[in-house]
Image (cartoon, rainbow, N blue to C red):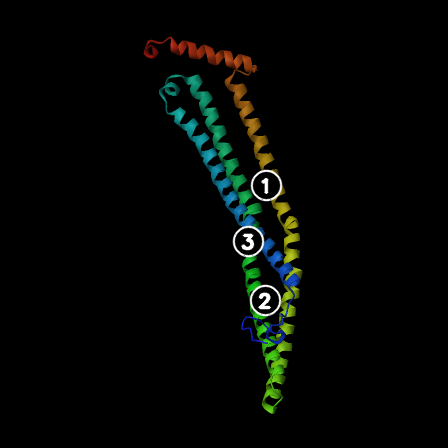
Amino acid sequence: MSWNPFSRSSSSLKKQVISKPSQREFDEAVERLDKLEELTRRLCKDVKKLTEANNALAKSEHKLSQDLLQTQLCTSEESFKNLIKKWDDEMERMEKNMTDRNVLLARSVLEPLKKYVGIFPYAQVAVKRREQSLQEFQKCQDRVSKYKERDRTGQNVVKLDVSTKAFHAAQVDFNNQNTTLMEDIPKMIDDRTDYLQPSLEAEIKSQVQYTTEAVKVYGDLSNLMNGHREHSKHDYASQIQQALTELRALSITAD
């Protein structure tokens, strides 16, 4: 029988220290953890963007009323100036309300998210340690297999004994790390709702509080600027159309 250099005898095959299903289960758990980290970091960015957008909105509205106060119309028309001044006062108050909302947003949502993100690097370190332990475990297994196949000389027996002790130590270390991670990773993933839900509830309540105040402020301003009269959508549309018609009739708009 001719020798085939590409064939592998059973003695040359490495005995794997962990089964493929067990390793696959661990890899799937780590993949879920990576996705959770990515989502959490994305939420942090979104909350920061929301805070910036809130500030920009409040400042833009306040600036609009301040700019109107500088116009000639407000200088010459006292009644109109009083209306815009009232609007400006309310916009200043709403800007402060938005600042308070952003403070609460940072305290109840952004800071907890940052703390949650801070846990993932520790998990990554633990995963790397487990991988290093697995490699050492495999090396010890290979050494034991190698010395078992050699002649039982005094020197080889001693080496086998030392390798076997190192193998058992590596096995204990790996099993401890693997068991801990297989318990902690799913628990960390499953507990995400309990951790994040209070933050989301705080954000919703903050939004409700701000929106409720905004509705009251803008409702009062609307009534004030319309002489405390209620108008239907049709009435407003008619007023706007009439104003546009009068503007088109001006000589400066003629073709």
Q: In the rendered structure, which disc, 2 or 3, sits on the residue that comes first in sequence? A: 3
Q: Amino acid at mark 3?
A: Val
Residue 138 vertical position relative to residue 252 in the rendered view, above or below = below
* Front position among marks 2 and 1: 2
Distance Cα–Cα, label 2 vs label 1: 38 Å
Task: Where is residue 159? Give x, y as percent.
Answer: 59, 85
Q: Which residue is mark 2?
A: 130
- The foreground one among 127 and 83 is 127
User: Mark 2: which secondary structure?
Assistant: helix
Asked if residue 229 can be seen in this view, the reply is: no
Amino acid beneath label 1 = Glu
Can see residue 210?
yes
User: Which mark is nearer the camera, 2 or 3?
Assistant: 2
Determine the secondary structure under disc 3: helix
Residue at 39%, 20% in the rendered image: 74
Asked whether the beta carbons under mark 1 and mark 3 sit within 8 Å of each other, the answer is no
Q: Quadrant of the C terminus?
A: top left
Give the amino acid type for the residue marked by disc 2 in the picture.
Answer: Arg
- Hey, which quadrant is residue 202 in on the image? top right
Q: Which residue is mark 1?
A: 203
Q: Residues within 10 Å of mark 1 (few under 14, many from 20)?
A: some
Marks 2,3: beta carbons within 8 A = no
Q: Quadrant of the N terminus?
A: bottom right
Q: Residues within 10 Å of mark 3 (few under 14, many from 20)?
A: some
Residue at image x 55%, y 69%? 132
Residue shown at the point (50%, 46%) measured from the top left: 45
User: 182 or 159: nearer the eye?
Assistant: 159
In this figure, which residue is indicated by the disc labeled 3?
Answer: 117
Local SS, label 1: helix
Q: Is residue 23 left or right of residue 86?
A: right
